[in-house]
Image: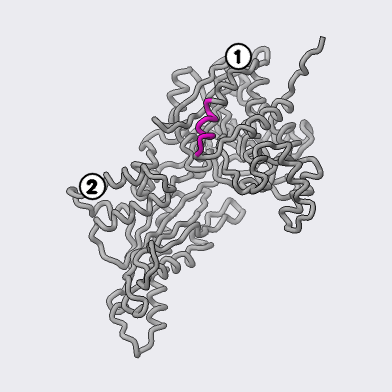
Amino acid sequence: MTHAPIETLSSRAQRWAIGLTEQKSITGTDGEAAFGPWLAAHLREQAAFQDAEVWTIEVKPQDGRHCVAMLLRGSARSTVLLTGHYDTVGTSDYGQLEHLATRPDALTKALRDSLVLAKAPAAVLAHEDFAGGEFVAGRGLLDMKAGLAAGLAVCAEFAESAKPVGNLLFIAVPDEENNSAGARKAAQILPGLCEERDLDLLAVINLDAIADDGDGSKGRVIALGTVGKLLPAAWVVGVPTHSGFPLNGLNAGAIAAAIAARVEWAPELTDACGTAPGTPPSLLGIADGKTRYDVTTPGTAHATFNVLSYRRTPDEVLDRFDSLCAEAASNLLREFRHRVSAQHETGLLEMVQLIPVHRYETLLARIDQSERTRFEGVSASIAAGDQPLPEKCRLLTEQAWELSRLAGPAIVTGFGSIPYLPTNLSAQPAAVRLRAAAIDVANEAAARYGDVVTCADYFAGISDMSFFGEADDSSLDIVARNTPAWKDAVRWPPKRALANIPTINIGPWGRDYHTPLERLHVGYSFNVLPRLIRDVCARLLQPDAS
């Protein structure tokens, strides 16, 4: 009689990783909407989870996307949450290989063969990786279904153990590649969920991927916090004029360009990471407001910037951004005056001594009550559209400007997207315990698993840790007041928006996610990663740690 082979942590992690990857879940598509119910049904079919409670949580009414939750009960109330996102970026960048994008084995072979004659450094490295057999390709395999798979493997082993200590809660969320609606929903319902099910949530382990183009030493990492991300925006109003008479106006595009040049890599917005240098800010988008060609200079322009932070709060970032915008505009006016010779009429420059900087909330405060209802209707209509969040914010700023009755030239600042706050493990007992468990497991990794694992203060990428972890949300109010689409498109509650639970990241490593060369290091991700997660959970859930 032939018996089915007993599954190990490694084999389960591999099986789940391939199975999850083969199920398409591109952000914003029917595949993402279908993935949640599919995963819930698939979990219920597993023998290991026959006693587990599995359910779905709708992101919002009529949204169509769901968080998938599974509770595995052991003894006592102590609980660890394992979480990660299941949505992926698109597959069109694979070109002729798109039909293989979510079939890891077939895609790996096809890429290995197609890269034989590659010359670009990234492609040459990818071919070496595939030829060596240590990496497997697939859209979403690295980012981040292999992380979810490792978490599920740990859940299965926990469920099959004789007398499991504590409880494991698993939640897979959608929308991380867009606006993190799934993680924000999960973070908001956690307190009620734990109260209803009598759980004491000790810690969260996020399962997101880490990229490393080297030997993997930067990928084999337990991250004890995460970097924060903000999107400061400057909407510029100029004085348009016929381009044959440029001195009669002020070009909004030129003002926006001056701001872009001043903010790019600005040390004032570069937040240092301990003793390491921080990541400088960078322009993410800039465009004038013209919708067709004519010879009139741009009357408006819009620029958005990526600003990363480790300790700095949103109000500090916006204060610094306002100052840089004002400085850039002042320097531009000074330069214009220098360029104009005595033979030119300079009436406009003489009249414009400075370009004022207003915050978005200033515009709102100037809108008459009689016009507020009309503006709120426009806001709801824009929020219901298909445009990305920064574009919705731009459109709303434009509408608010028209109703404010202010005159240009001017600069309106605010934020163009949701905030990702930095998280750090605090001095609270639960956070201290989580830090100690992570450091101990990392220190023992070489001896126990054969791989050196280190702890890092911060996860370098944007992640859902910002909504689960311990973050300073004291200045979220200023973000809400200055993010035009906050009320109707973001829908972030004023209270209990963040879980504020001690959170770390333990995820797979690989290379080139979000590109056709996305690939996973299989040895670490299938053999070491699940054991790291299991051992951290065990240290947290053991009786003397509760």
Q: Main secondary structure of the magenta part?
A: helix
Q: Which mark is residue 374?
A: 2
Badge 2 crowding class, 10 Å Cα cut-off, few under 14, some 14 to 19, many 20 or more, is few
Closest to the camera, between mark 2 and mark 1, is: 2
Depth check: 269 or 282 in front?
282
Please identify the quarter of the rendering in which residue 300 is found: bottom left
Please rate how many residues cluster around mark 1, counting C-alpha atoms within 10 Å: few if below 14, some from 14 to 19, many from 20. few
Q: Is residue 9 visible?
A: yes
Which amino acid, mark 1? Answer: Gln
- Picture disc at residue 3: none
Range shown magenta: 29-37
Q: Position of residue 543 (x, y in %)?
A: 61, 19
Residue on which disc 1 sits: 50
Q: Residue at x 58, y 51 (%)?
A: 273
**Amino acid at pointer 2:** Arg
- Could you tell whether 157 is left or right of 191 in the image? right
Question: Please, what secondary structure does the residue beneath circle 1 have?
Answer: loop
Q: Of the two numbered discs 2 and 1 on the same chain, state the one appearing first in sequence.
A: 1
- For this orientation, the residue located farthest to the top is 1
Residue placed at 78% from the left, 40% from the top? 134
